[in-house]
Amino acid sequence: GEDVEQSLFLSVREGDSSVINCTYTDSSSTYLYWYKQEPGAGLQLLTYIFSNMDMKQDQRLTVLLNKKDKHLSLRIADTQTGDSAIYFCAEYQTGANNLFFGTGTRLTVIP
Amino acid sequence: EPEVTQTPSHQVTQMGQEVILRCVPISNHLYFYWYRQILGQKVEFLVSFYNNEISEKSEIFDDQFSVERPDGSNFTLKIRSTKLEDSAMYFCASSEEPGLAGETQYFGPGTRLLVL
């Protein structure tokens, strides 16, 4: 079955880069997503990458995809205290027509 | 910017009672979804809905659950007889149409359901 894994916690100092990693198991994934969840709030779409791409950059966010290793990462440059949140990766499979979420990584930014 | 809205934001109910969670998807979207997140756990898919019928559903979505699009804007999730383990955050999402990046699902802020 589908299994999306992330490390649970990450702490970085303000101004440093954060790298949040995700592994997935289904090679038929077409899109991979990063969502951000602030305390008590909903899921905010941050960015996504299509499976035929290796990299996507969007302002401070860089997504890297290694299809061979089924590894996805989200890099946040110049991390700010407002970036503190839980970050979920999710994969979309065309046949299933729904998202499979990872466990979420709680990012803590230390001032 | 268009967004998915959900009401209520919080609901407390007694075990065995029926609850209806409401969602207004983004207006030009065609696919609608419900997910839930039990405290401290993964976000889990419940059901997808397209063209006035269920498209996919997970094992969680048993006979106690139902979905409906009663009019042109609302999308509802009904739990007929709530159980303690139904306590969770319930997220509604919508998307355009698969293909052409239409898989991107936009989520509402969630309804936190507490069953006592």
Image (tube, coloured by chain):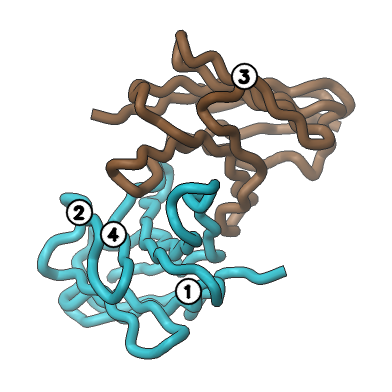
Chain colours: A brown, B cyan
Mark 4 residue element: strand
Location of mark 3 (residue) = A54
Residue type at the position of mark 2? Ile
Q: Where does residue A14 sit, x and y in percent of width and height?
A: 86, 29
Q: Nearer the viewer, mark 4 or mark 2?
A: 4
Residue at the image position 47 percent from the left and 84 percent from the top: B73
Residue type at the position of mark 1? His
Location of mark 2 (residue) = B60
Q: Residues within 10 Å of mark 4 (few under 14, many from 20)?
A: many
For this rendering, which residue is in front, B23 or B97? B97
Q: Where does residue B102 sit, x and y in percent of width and height?
A: 51, 53
Marks 2/3 in contact by CB < 8 Å: the verdict is no
What is the chain letter for disc 1?
B
Name the disc covering residue B47, or none: 4
Marks 1/4 in contact by CB < 8 Å: the verdict is no
**How far is mark 3 from mark 4, CA to CA?**
31 Å
Q: Nearer the viewer, mark 1 or mark 3?
A: 3
Q: Are marks 1 and 3 on the same chain?
A: no
Say which label, 1 or 4, has the lower sequence index. 1
Residue type at the position of mark 4? Val
Q: Quadrant of residue B51?
A: bottom left
Say which label, 4 or 2, has the lower sequence index. 4
Q: Where does residue B62 sit, x and y in percent of width and height?
A: 13, 61
Mark 1 residue element: strand
Q: Nearer the viewer, mark 1 or mark 4?
A: 4
Mark 2 residue element: loop
Location of mark 1 (residue) = B10
Residue at the image position 75 percent from the left and 40 percent from the top: A83
Q: Nearer the viewer, mark 3 or mark 4?
A: 3
What is the chain letter for disc 3?
A
